[in-house]
Image (tube, grey):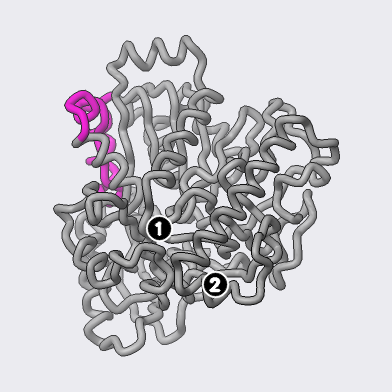
Amino acid sequence: MTHVLLPALRGAPASPQQEKTARQQRARLAEMVAHARACSPYYRELYQGLPERVEDPTLLPVTHKKALVARFEDWVADRDVTLDKVQRFIGNPALIGEKFLDKYVVATTSGTTGTPGIFVLDDRHVSLGMTAVRRAFGQWLSVWDWVRILARGMRTAALHATGGHYASVGAVTRMQRSSRIAARQIRQFSVHTPLPQLVAELNGFRPALLTGYATVTSLLAGEREAGRLRINPVLVVVTAEGLPQDEYGRMARVFGAKVGNVWGSTEMPAVAYSCAYGWLHVMEDWLIVEPVHADYRPTPAGEQSHTVLISNLANRVQPILRYDLGDRILVRPDACPCGNPQPAVRIEGRSGDVLNFETPGGERVSLPPLALELDDIPGIEVAQVVQTTPASLRVRLLLVAGSDPDRVWQAAHDALVRLLAEHKLEHVTIERAEEPPEQSKGGKFRQVIPLS
């Protein structure tokens, strides 16, 4: 078996706990494959000819978001879930954080892999995310840290790309609605907010916990270093985007806080969480991770993969099995010195590039990738914003088949004009590109490409 649970990848015999986890993993995979065959027409067709019981993920065909999304109603394992119902649900912003059909969470994704996704998640999937949070906090925080957090009222600032049915926004919204205490403790901040305004709002809130996208958090560390941001969080949790390894140490030093890093996706919440040595430890009891080459041959430990295949062993309503996630990972070939027996990895996921500009008055403005997302505009499959000069952008679009190119371009242009105006960058020009977006080595599309 090629997934990261294999003790051989760590160069040591399996411990009793690792053997127990391996047995759990095999049993859960067999159960999930059987369920997918029985309830999902897509998987029933895909798995024809396979053995009756499957405990080895390498026996399964690789799945891709584009093919799954194209067969959405055959993919889902609940016949009450239809694409029309889901699209009407996510089309209503008032329903963010509410349950779809009174029993499921619906989350959308951006198109960094070339296909925006709609994911229906059941209670087991959601509970797994909470389990990951508890494990991570247990790794990161001491008793004294908790005392300091409690003394500050547990105030938590969550930095999100708001305005859509994104997994993190929905999760926080549900917590806020479920409890008056949570509503007071947790506040959501939009990453689309101009940086000076975001700094002012955070200064007023004074969070004990700060969590959000890595690039935005890195920008805030710069504001803290300059003395404009005056918050002293106990813990900073960064997610979603890759940063240079030494940037996490810089953030810890600037904030005077512990910094935790989470590798997660809508398809699989909190895949792994960081330790004190900068490695991410995989939630292997509910997840199978396979680092592979471009032809899907297994990548050895110590070597960076071309992509990674994941199997979610929790979510039954929309099975995700041997799914090409698109991230590039490196598995540590030996035991991590932190003592955590779970496999340790490092990730090259979504690029954390930032675009930098100057206003006519000489003020520096930095825009993170999420502020420049255009994938939610109808008709756009992938958008890529390229900075070609200090004051010009070139926009590459890959459109959904049948879309009106001029109408889609106008919508994208207008969205960027509004964003730039909010940041006093009206002088920045926007150019329509003829060439399509370019993919990275890992197969994902960089949302933004900064000036060389």
Write down the residue under mark 1.
Answer: 317
Most foreground residue, 104 or 407: 104
- Residue 285 x %, y %: 60, 41
Disc 1 marks a residue whose amino acid type is Val
| Residue 362 visible, this angle | no
Which quadrant does the N terminus fall into?
Answer: bottom right
Disc 2 marks a residue whose amino acid type is Gln
- Residue 408 x %, y %: 26, 80
- Looking at the image, tell me whether mark 1 or mark 2 is earlier in sequence order: 1
- Residue 278 x %, y %: 63, 35
Q: Residue at x 31, y 56 (%)?
A: 106
Quadrant of the image occupied by residue 48: bottom right
Most foreground residue, 360 or 438: 438
**193 left or right, relative to 292:** left
Q: Residue at x 70, y 42 (%)?
A: 22
Q: CA distance from mark 1 to mark 2?
A: 31 Å
**Label 2, residues with CA under 10 Å away: few <14, some 14-19, many ≥20:** some
Write down the residue under mark 2.
Answer: 439
| Magenta region | 178-206
**Label 1, residues with CA under 10 Å away: few <14, some 14-19, many ≥20:** many
Q: Residue at x 70, y 58 (%)?
A: 56
Q: Nearer the viewer, mark 1 or mark 2?
A: 1
